[in-house]
Amino acid sequence: MSKELPKRIFREGEEPQVSQINNNCRIDYIIRKFKAWLPKELDVVKKDPVFSQIFKLHENGLGYSARVIHNFLCRELVTYKLHEIWFVFARRPLRFSLQEFHAVTGFECNTRISVKEFEEWKYDGGFWSNVLRRKDGTITLFNLWTKDKEVVKKWRNADRIRLIYLAIILCVVLARAEKANIPLKYITVVMDLERVRKYPWGVAAYDLLCNSVAKNCDKLKDKTTSYVLDGFSHALQIWAMEAVPKIGKEHMNVFPRTG
Protein backbone atom coordinates (compact mmCIF):
# COMPACT_ATOMS: atom_id res chain seq x y z
CA MET A 1 0.00 0.00 0.00
CA SER A 2 1.35 3.42 -0.95
CA LYS A 3 2.25 5.71 1.92
CA GLU A 4 2.04 8.80 -0.26
CA LEU A 5 -0.32 11.46 1.03
CA PRO A 6 -3.02 12.98 -1.17
CA LYS A 7 -1.99 16.14 -2.97
CA ARG A 8 -2.19 19.45 -1.14
CA ILE A 9 -4.55 22.09 -2.48
CA PHE A 10 -1.64 24.54 -2.27
CA ARG A 11 1.84 23.20 -2.81
CA GLU A 12 4.42 23.68 -0.07
CA GLY A 13 6.13 27.02 -0.44
CA GLU A 14 3.31 28.38 -2.61
CA GLU A 15 0.76 29.07 0.13
CA PRO A 16 -1.29 32.21 -0.60
CA GLN A 17 -0.81 35.26 1.61
CA VAL A 18 -3.77 37.37 2.73
CA SER A 19 -4.09 40.69 4.52
CA GLN A 20 -7.39 40.12 6.32
CA ILE A 21 -9.70 37.32 7.47
CA ASN A 22 -13.11 38.33 8.79
CA ASN A 23 -14.70 36.01 11.32
CA ASN A 24 -18.50 36.01 11.52
CA CYS A 25 -18.56 33.97 14.75
CA ARG A 26 -18.50 36.55 17.57
CA ILE A 27 -18.90 34.87 20.94
CA ASP A 28 -17.70 37.74 23.13
CA TYR A 29 -19.81 40.33 21.31
CA ILE A 30 -23.07 38.39 21.72
CA ILE A 31 -22.55 37.47 25.37
CA ARG A 32 -21.51 40.98 26.39
CA LYS A 33 -24.57 42.40 24.66
CA PHE A 34 -26.99 40.16 26.57
CA LYS A 35 -25.17 40.63 29.87
CA ALA A 36 -26.03 44.30 29.60
CA TRP A 37 -29.49 43.88 28.08
CA LEU A 38 -31.13 40.71 29.45
CA PRO A 39 -28.80 39.35 32.16
CA LYS A 40 -31.39 37.22 34.01
CA GLU A 41 -32.52 35.50 30.83
CA LEU A 42 -28.89 34.96 29.81
CA ASP A 43 -28.22 33.20 33.11
CA VAL A 44 -31.10 30.80 32.34
CA VAL A 45 -29.63 29.93 28.93
CA LYS A 46 -26.13 29.49 30.36
CA LYS A 47 -27.42 26.72 32.64
CA ASP A 48 -28.63 24.71 29.64
CA PRO A 49 -25.93 22.15 28.67
CA VAL A 50 -26.82 22.26 24.96
CA PHE A 51 -24.43 25.18 24.28
CA SER A 52 -22.43 25.06 27.51
CA GLN A 53 -19.12 24.75 25.66
CA ILE A 54 -19.67 28.15 24.03
CA PHE A 55 -19.94 29.81 27.42
CA LYS A 56 -16.89 27.91 28.68
CA LEU A 57 -14.85 29.17 25.75
CA HIS A 58 -15.94 32.71 26.55
CA GLU A 59 -15.14 32.34 30.26
CA ASN A 60 -11.71 30.94 29.41
CA GLY A 61 -10.90 34.07 27.46
CA LEU A 62 -11.00 32.58 23.97
CA GLY A 63 -9.12 34.75 21.50
CA TYR A 64 -9.52 34.33 17.76
CA SER A 65 -6.39 33.66 15.71
CA ALA A 66 -6.88 34.19 11.99
CA ARG A 67 -3.25 33.14 11.48
CA VAL A 68 -3.90 29.64 12.81
CA ILE A 69 -7.00 29.24 10.66
CA HIS A 70 -5.28 30.45 7.50
CA ASN A 71 -2.21 28.33 8.21
CA PHE A 72 -4.34 25.20 8.21
CA LEU A 73 -6.48 26.19 5.23
CA CYS A 74 -3.25 26.40 3.23
CA ARG A 75 -2.35 22.86 4.35
CA GLU A 76 -5.58 21.17 3.27
CA LEU A 77 -5.30 17.92 1.36
CA VAL A 78 -7.39 17.06 -1.70
CA THR A 79 -9.90 14.50 -0.38
CA TYR A 80 -13.50 13.62 -1.11
CA LYS A 81 -15.00 12.29 2.10
CA LEU A 82 -18.35 13.09 3.67
CA HIS A 83 -18.20 15.02 6.94
CA GLU A 84 -14.42 15.19 7.13
CA ILE A 85 -11.57 17.27 5.79
CA TRP A 86 -7.85 16.52 6.04
CA PHE A 87 -4.79 18.67 6.56
CA VAL A 88 -1.08 17.92 6.71
CA PHE A 89 1.52 19.16 9.16
CA ALA A 90 5.14 17.92 9.16
CA ARG A 91 4.14 15.14 6.76
CA ARG A 92 1.51 13.95 9.24
CA PRO A 93 -2.12 13.76 8.01
CA LEU A 94 -4.65 15.29 10.42
CA ARG A 95 -8.38 14.64 10.21
CA PHE A 96 -10.99 17.23 11.17
CA SER A 97 -14.31 15.39 11.04
CA LEU A 98 -17.66 15.51 12.79
CA GLN A 99 -16.07 13.41 15.54
CA GLU A 100 -13.40 16.03 16.26
CA PHE A 101 -15.95 18.83 15.89
CA HIS A 102 -18.17 17.19 18.52
CA ALA A 103 -15.20 16.69 20.87
CA VAL A 104 -14.47 20.43 20.77
CA THR A 105 -18.01 21.82 20.81
CA GLY A 106 -20.19 19.19 22.45
CA PHE A 107 -22.85 19.93 19.79
CA GLU A 108 -25.22 17.15 18.70
CA CYS A 109 -23.58 15.51 15.66
CA ASN A 110 -25.92 12.58 14.96
CA THR A 111 -26.34 12.48 11.18
CA ARG A 112 -29.26 10.07 11.45
CA ILE A 113 -31.53 12.67 13.06
CA SER A 114 -34.12 13.98 10.62
CA VAL A 115 -34.75 17.72 10.84
CA LYS A 116 -38.32 17.26 9.57
CA GLU A 117 -39.50 16.47 13.08
CA PHE A 118 -38.50 19.99 14.13
CA GLU A 119 -40.68 21.78 11.58
CA GLU A 120 -43.96 21.74 13.53
CA TRP A 121 -44.82 24.45 16.03
CA LYS A 122 -47.62 25.34 18.42
CA TYR A 123 -49.08 28.81 18.67
CA ASP A 124 -48.72 30.06 22.26
CA GLY A 125 -49.75 33.70 21.79
CA GLY A 126 -46.20 35.03 22.23
CA PHE A 127 -44.09 37.27 20.01
CA TRP A 128 -42.34 34.47 18.12
CA SER A 129 -45.58 32.64 17.43
CA ASN A 130 -46.91 35.80 15.82
CA VAL A 131 -43.79 36.03 13.66
CA LEU A 132 -44.40 32.47 12.47
CA ARG A 133 -48.01 33.24 11.68
CA ARG A 134 -46.90 36.24 9.60
CA LYS A 135 -44.22 34.26 7.78
CA ASP A 136 -42.80 37.35 6.10
CA GLY A 137 -39.23 36.73 7.26
CA THR A 138 -38.45 40.36 8.10
CA ILE A 139 -37.24 40.08 11.71
CA THR A 140 -33.53 40.70 12.36
CA LEU A 141 -31.55 40.54 15.57
CA PHE A 142 -30.02 43.92 14.77
CA ASN A 143 -33.42 45.65 14.68
CA LEU A 144 -34.57 43.93 17.86
CA TRP A 145 -31.63 45.20 19.89
CA THR A 146 -31.55 48.67 18.35
CA LYS A 147 -35.00 49.92 17.32
CA ASP A 148 -37.00 47.60 19.63
CA LYS A 149 -34.61 47.26 22.57
CA GLU A 150 -37.01 48.59 25.21
CA VAL A 151 -40.02 46.81 23.69
CA VAL A 152 -38.22 43.47 24.02
CA LYS A 153 -37.88 44.00 27.78
CA LYS A 154 -41.69 44.01 27.99
CA TRP A 155 -42.06 40.65 26.25
CA ARG A 156 -42.97 37.52 28.14
CA ASN A 157 -40.03 35.87 29.86
CA ALA A 158 -40.30 32.82 27.57
CA ASP A 159 -39.97 34.98 24.45
CA ARG A 160 -36.92 36.83 25.81
CA ILE A 161 -35.23 33.51 26.57
CA ARG A 162 -36.00 32.32 23.04
CA LEU A 163 -34.36 35.48 21.70
CA ILE A 164 -31.10 34.60 23.45
CA TYR A 165 -31.20 31.05 22.10
CA LEU A 166 -31.74 32.45 18.61
CA ALA A 167 -28.84 34.88 18.97
CA ILE A 168 -26.49 32.09 20.12
CA ILE A 169 -27.66 29.78 17.32
CA LEU A 170 -27.52 32.37 14.55
CA CYS A 171 -24.51 34.53 15.47
CA VAL A 172 -22.27 31.93 17.11
CA VAL A 173 -23.16 28.35 16.11
CA LEU A 174 -24.07 29.26 12.51
CA ALA A 175 -22.17 32.57 12.41
CA ARG A 176 -24.80 34.52 10.50
CA ALA A 177 -24.77 38.32 10.31
CA GLU A 178 -26.97 40.05 12.88
CA LYS A 179 -28.55 42.16 10.13
CA ALA A 180 -29.73 39.09 8.19
CA ASN A 181 -33.38 38.07 8.47
CA ILE A 182 -33.97 35.36 11.07
CA PRO A 183 -34.90 32.13 9.22
CA LEU A 184 -38.36 30.97 10.26
CA LYS A 185 -37.16 27.38 10.65
CA TYR A 186 -34.97 28.37 13.60
CA ILE A 187 -37.81 30.30 15.22
CA THR A 188 -39.85 27.10 14.85
CA VAL A 189 -37.16 25.13 16.68
CA VAL A 190 -36.87 27.52 19.64
CA MET A 191 -40.64 27.41 20.19
CA ASP A 192 -39.88 24.16 22.03
CA LEU A 193 -36.61 24.13 23.98
CA GLU A 194 -36.58 20.33 24.09
CA ARG A 195 -36.25 20.43 20.33
CA VAL A 196 -33.37 22.89 20.67
CA ARG A 197 -31.56 20.32 22.80
CA LYS A 198 -32.17 17.52 20.28
CA TYR A 199 -31.51 19.41 17.05
CA PRO A 200 -28.30 18.31 15.23
CA TRP A 201 -26.55 21.67 15.59
CA GLY A 202 -23.19 20.01 15.18
CA VAL A 203 -24.04 18.69 11.73
CA ALA A 204 -25.45 22.05 10.61
CA ALA A 205 -22.50 24.04 11.98
CA TYR A 206 -19.84 21.61 10.75
CA ASP A 207 -21.24 21.45 7.21
CA LEU A 208 -21.48 25.24 7.08
CA LEU A 209 -17.88 25.58 8.21
CA CYS A 210 -16.62 23.00 5.70
CA ASN A 211 -18.52 24.68 2.87
CA SER A 212 -16.96 28.00 3.84
CA VAL A 213 -13.48 26.44 3.92
CA ALA A 214 -14.00 24.98 0.43
CA LYS A 215 -15.37 28.25 -0.94
CA ASN A 216 -12.48 30.26 0.45
CA CYS A 217 -9.87 27.81 -0.83
CA ASP A 218 -11.29 28.43 -4.30
CA LYS A 219 -11.00 32.19 -3.72
CA LEU A 220 -7.42 31.79 -2.54
CA LYS A 221 -6.61 30.06 -5.82
CA ASP A 222 -7.75 33.26 -7.52
CA LYS A 223 -5.25 35.26 -5.43
CA THR A 224 -7.77 36.98 -3.17
CA THR A 225 -6.21 39.09 -0.41
CA SER A 226 -9.04 38.75 2.12
CA TYR A 227 -11.98 36.50 2.88
CA VAL A 228 -14.86 35.90 5.28
CA LEU A 229 -15.02 32.62 7.19
CA ASP A 230 -18.52 31.44 8.07
CA GLY A 231 -19.49 28.80 10.61
CA PHE A 232 -18.16 28.01 14.09
CA SER A 233 -14.52 28.43 13.03
CA HIS A 234 -13.33 28.56 16.65
CA ALA A 235 -13.72 24.78 16.67
CA LEU A 236 -11.22 24.44 13.81
CA GLN A 237 -8.80 26.76 15.61
CA ILE A 238 -8.99 24.87 18.91
CA TRP A 239 -8.62 21.50 17.19
CA ALA A 240 -5.59 22.73 15.21
CA MET A 241 -3.86 24.06 18.30
CA GLU A 242 -4.44 20.82 20.17
CA ALA A 243 -3.48 18.63 17.21
CA VAL A 244 -0.20 20.52 16.78
CA PRO A 245 1.00 21.71 20.22
CA LYS A 246 3.75 23.78 18.59
CA ILE A 247 1.11 26.05 17.06
CA GLY A 248 -0.70 26.33 20.37
CA LYS A 249 2.46 27.54 22.12
CA GLU A 250 3.24 30.06 19.40
CA HIS A 251 -0.24 31.57 19.66
CA MET A 252 -0.80 31.34 23.40
CA ASN A 253 -1.01 35.12 23.60
CA VAL A 254 -3.88 35.05 21.11
CA PHE A 255 -5.61 32.00 22.52
CA PRO A 256 -5.32 31.84 26.33
CA ARG A 257 -6.47 28.61 27.96
CA THR A 258 -7.37 28.92 31.63
CA GLY A 259 -9.32 25.75 32.23
Image (cartoon, rainbow, N blue to C red):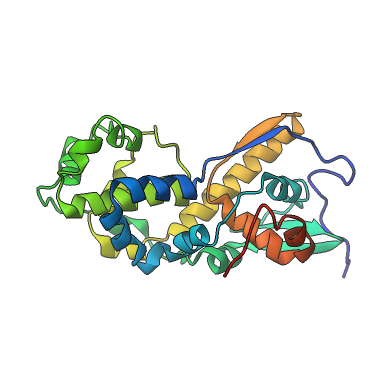
Left/right of residue 178 with respect to residue 152 in the rendered view: right
Q: Position of residue 202 (x, y in %)?
A: 48, 60
Left/right of residue 139 with respect to residue 55 in the rendered view: left
Q: In which quarter of the view is residue 251 placed?
A: bottom right
Q: Position of residue 116 (x, y in %)?
A: 32, 56
Tell me what residue is drawn at x 74 percent, y 29 percent. 222
Q: In which quarter of the view is residue 133 placed?
A: top left
Quarter of the N terminus within the rendering: bottom right
Residue 48 in the image: above or below residue 188: below
Tell me what residue is drawn at x 68 percent, y 31 percent. 226
Tell me what residue is drawn at x 75 percent, y 56 percent. 87
Left/right of residue 243 with respect to residue 27 in the rendered view: right
Residue 244 in the image: above or below residue 20: below
Q: In which quarter of the view is residue 198 placed?
A: bottom left
Quarter of the C terminus within the rendering: bottom right
Q: Position of residue 187 (x, y in %)?
A: 28, 47
Name the residue furthest front: 36
Residue 174 in sight here: no
Q: How many marks?
A: 0
Front residue of 43/143: it is: 43
Front residue of 67/214: it is: 67
Q: Position of residue 36 (x, y in %)?
A: 33, 47
